[in-house]
Amino acid sequence: MEVDTNIQKLEKLKNAEINKALGLFILFFGLVIVVATFFTTTFIGQMTNLAAGIVLTAIGAGMVIKAQMQIKKINTTSQNE
C-alpha cells in the first residue's frame, strides 16, 4: 500500500510541476501582451491587448500559485509520514 501512495504522490508532484511551468509561460506571455499595449496605435487595439494581457496574466498567476500550494502540501504531507 505504501508503494501505491508514493507513486500517487510522485504523480501529483509531477503534474504540479508541469502546471507551474505552463503557468509561468502563460504569465510571461500575458505580460508581453500588456507591454505591447503601449506600442499599439489604435484605441481598440490597446483595449484588446490590455484585456487579453490581464486575462492571461491572471490565469498564469493563478496556475503558478495553485501549483506552488500543491507542491507545498505534497512535500509537507510526505515529511509528516
Image: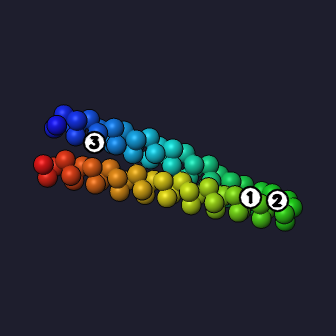
Write the residue at 77% across / 60% down: 48
Q: Residue furthest right?
A: 42
- Compare marks 2 and 3 and give the one earlier in the sequence: 3
The image's mark for residue 49 is 1
Q: Nearer the viewer, mark 3 or mark 1?
A: 3
Which amino acid is tagged 3? Lys
Where disc 2 sits, the SS reads helix
**Residue type at tag 2:** Gly
Determine which quarter of the picture holds residue 4. top left
Tag 1 near tag 2, CB within 8 Å = yes
Assign a secondary structure to mark 3: helix
> Which of disc 1 and disc 3 is earlier in sequence?
3
Which amino acid lies under the numbered mark 1 shown in the image of this protein? Asn
Vertical arrangement, residue 56 with respect to residue 1, above or below: below
What residue occupies the far front of the structure in this picture?
1
Q: Is residue 42 left or right of residue 9?
A: right
User: Pointer 2 and pointer 3: residues touching (CB < 8 Å)?
Assistant: no
- 35 and 66: which is toward the camera: 66
Q: Residue at x 21, y 52 (%)?
A: 77
Residue at horizontal 72 percent and vertical 55 percent from the top: 36
